[in-house]
Amino acid sequence: MISFVIAAILLPFLIASLCLREQRESRRRTLCICSASMCGVSLVVAGLLGEYRTIPALISFDPVTSKLGILLSAITIALTFAAPTRAFDAVGSERVNILLGLVNLLLFTDNLALFVLGWLASWWIISRELVRRDQERRNIGSASATYIACHCIAAVSLFGLLAESCYSSWVSREMAVFSIDALSASSLASNSFAFIVSLIPVWIAFGMAPIHFWMSHFLVPTRCTGSLLLSQLAGSGIALVRVVDPLSSSHPAMLEAVGVLGAMTILYFALVMFRETHLPRATLYLYLSQVALLFITFGVAEGERGVLALHLTNLIVGASGMVLVITMLHARIGAERISSIRGCAHLLPHAAVCFLISALSLVCFPGTLGFLLEEGIVSGALSHHLPIVSVVVVALALNGYSAMRVFGGVFLGPKDPELTPQLSLLPRERLGAVALATIVILAGMVPGLIASQH
Amino acid sequence: MAPLYLSLISLGVILFPTLGVGALLVDRFVSRIYSEKRITGIVSFCLGLSCLCSLLLTFIALHTGQQIEVTVIPLFGHEGIPLFLDSLSLPFVVVSTSLSWLVSLFSKPYLHRESGHYRFFLLLLGFVSAILLVFMSKNLHGVFIGWEVVGLASTLLISFFYSDCKTVKSGLTAFFSYRAADVGLVLALIIGHKLGHTSFSAVGEGHSITGASVTLFSLGILWASLGKSSQYPFVRWLPRAMEGPTPSSAIFYGAISVHAGVYLMLRTLLSVEVSPIVALLMGASGVFTAFYGTLLGRIQSDVKSSLAYASMAQVGLMFLEMGIGLRDFVVLHFVGHAVLRTYQLLHAPAAFQVHGGLERLHLAPLECPGGLYQRLIPRKVQLFLYRVSFKETTYRGCHSFGSLALLRFLSEKAWSFEHGLTFLATEGSRRLLIASSPRRTSASRPSLVAPSIKSHIGGVQ
């Protein structure tokens, strides 16, 4: 069994190396999907085995992270499979996808140093991709420079965490500080410096205010925008659940501050989105509002740590659906302003449904995956913080209206004369959109699949 | 707990429309040829069965006089949603199921060969399932789920003819009002949780609770009800909502959806002690809306708009009745109003034709009915009232003075701040990177950032 699991994890590396050499696009895509599927299979096996360790003290899978990993693989497959080819340069996008997928495997290691290495590698790949994209768009440095500058701060914090771990290890003569699974029991757990330096990179990588500037350029639609966002999100999410959360238990005042900052952020982004006319940016603010809600839950919800996985799942699925639709629209129309796109529902009904359902999930609408979060809030998770709850409720209401406004602006209205029947969705694009929408609805209708275990 | 057969029948009321939604979705994926007959058949069948179940329940309830407490829907959460039917919810359920069934039959020829035929029936079934959840749910959680889905279905049906920008804007106006009103319901739900009071008790068994938090709770419920029933300050969306197809206008804004607020208030009034402030606000809003609806309804130039204002005025009277404590009378008022208004709205597209037909039959112009208004009110006052009604600018002024203007102002400021800050940060990082990047001269050593930035700077210069 051990050899099977090891093989299942290593096989994607083999397939990926084939993928990187392959020149034909169809075959490259197939190999890419196979590779991601194999990652998924290995993680499913690991998840079924519970807290099984393939190589003791090196790679570990707990129920939360293995579920996130499975979801990550599934969405990577959907995005790779459904990525629009029209108007985008396809060369290299699969390579980026597969490299990110493989690097993200390092996030499942039990060793803090390897974990940090995986994170940095992921940022390096994303930076390179952003530089390439900036050059293509002749918009030099707008995305890459802000991304690199912001993530340099995060990298410094990460090295600070590693340094603190080394120091603690040297002082206490224990190696447990490098084991992620044993973090909560180690001496680092009571160290406020370790908590801050672990929180800063996660805060930046999620794009929380006030260091969220890189995000507005990050979501420029290209063929692998979804994968970049997904990788970024998965990395930060897994870090939040595995590293920051165990270190947070003995710092209630700081957690309270995180919650208050989150409340201010959610209201701010809801207000900005109310006025936004740029489609990718409107999506971005919706996403950031949901991230702020995640941090509010992390900060002030009592006894609701398991909900973090639910938040991340909702973010991953909702944001992926919206970004997929944006890339589809951009590939066909080329415009990004809401005022210059209209009536797309005539020709792209599947994209319209996917966009609507994903957006509704991000604003916690009943019947979608996101509703479980609102249900958690009203059921008392935040009941001791009535001002914060009020802010969250107002912000979610505003976001709901704004999401509907964006949907109405883009998909409803008179038919766009530029949209011809030749530009309708390809079958694989349609399948990807329907799959994502179905995940949102099914998980919302049968939440026990996710919620019961937390 | 009710006997098993009663539970099954009660569950059937809500289950059949929900199964109908599933059947339509499956049909869309499975069948290759779209058949109007099949779609309308599924819808009429499901709604007919639901109507039959509700009538059976009424019959049983009248004979046995017992309250029916039903099973649980295990779909939406761990504990599920308990359903129940009592003397308050039964009239609402019976009216909803029977009118929806009739409207589905009416829509069959009305929407023949319409491009959104499938969409209409899917949304109709979704709406009926959601509104039945509102009426049958035993706690506020179930009400909230149904409430939100009703709002979404309403918005999508207002924007049914979505090629027209005007209908889309009207849908968005309605959705904005719904979202603003939903804030009240969510806050009430949170306060209810703190009070440990989110479950409704049966009629006559109300364990009343009092206190300052209850006033806040009732205010939240009142706010949500005003929004859903288009009472002041949410009076602007209902006339615009008439942009949708006539059958949906009839079922939403004549019969059921517009009365959901009334139901929620009635249901809450039975379980909490309403403070005088809430009763006063409820009555005042009702009176004001009744006057507003009556005045503006008289100057409308199309049938559906005048019916919308008439609906608004009648619902305003219901709120007044609740404010002064005539709760049983409100249920009677609801039944009469819902049935009459549905008939009027379904009849509206043919109203002029029928009027002309009658005139041709009588060979003379028909006399205008009523005349009480002209006889009772002096001429000068009439003219003054007409002038007030026409002055929509006054109204616009009143509304934009409120929270919407503040919201727009705040969002404008936040947007400008955000974009300014993003620009500064982008420029700052770009320059920082240019300053810190090593100067490379060899072409054999590709650089990550510097060449691109250099070329950009070169281009700019």
Image: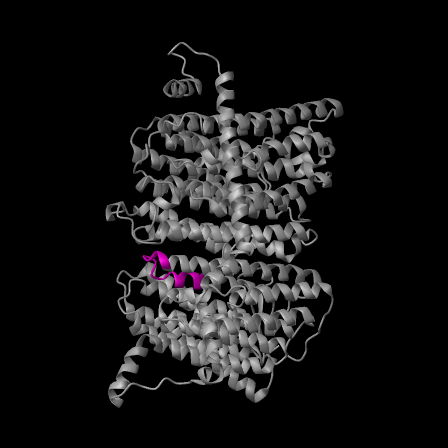
Identify the residue at the far front of this view.
Answer: B380
Number of callouts in the render?
A: 0
Residue at (30%, 47%) from the top-left corner? A425
Is residue A318 something one can see in this rendering?
yes
Q: Main SS of the magenta segment?
A: helix
Which one is in front, A141 or A34? A141
Identify the residue at the far right of this view.
Answer: A172
Is residue A7 placed above or below B300 in the rendered structure? above
Determine the image quadrant of residue B225.
bottom right
Determine the image quadrant of residue A83.
top left
Residue B339, horizontal then vertical, whole percent: 44, 80
Which one is in front, A48 or B338? B338
Q: How is the image coloured?
A: one colour
Tell me if residue A277 is in the magenta stretch.
no
Is residue A313 something one can see in this rendering?
no
Magenta segment:
B152-166
Residue at (48%, 46%) from the top-left corner? A275
Residue A86, horizontal then vertical, whole percent: 29, 38
Which one is in front, B54 or B346? B346
Residue A404, horizontal then vertical, whole percent: 45, 53
Is residue A210 placed above or below B451 in the rendered structure? below
Which one is in front, A296 or A21? A296
Q: Is residue A77 left or right of residue A120?
A: left
Residue A95, horizontal then vertical, whole percent: 39, 30
Tell me if residue B162 is in the magenta stretch.
yes
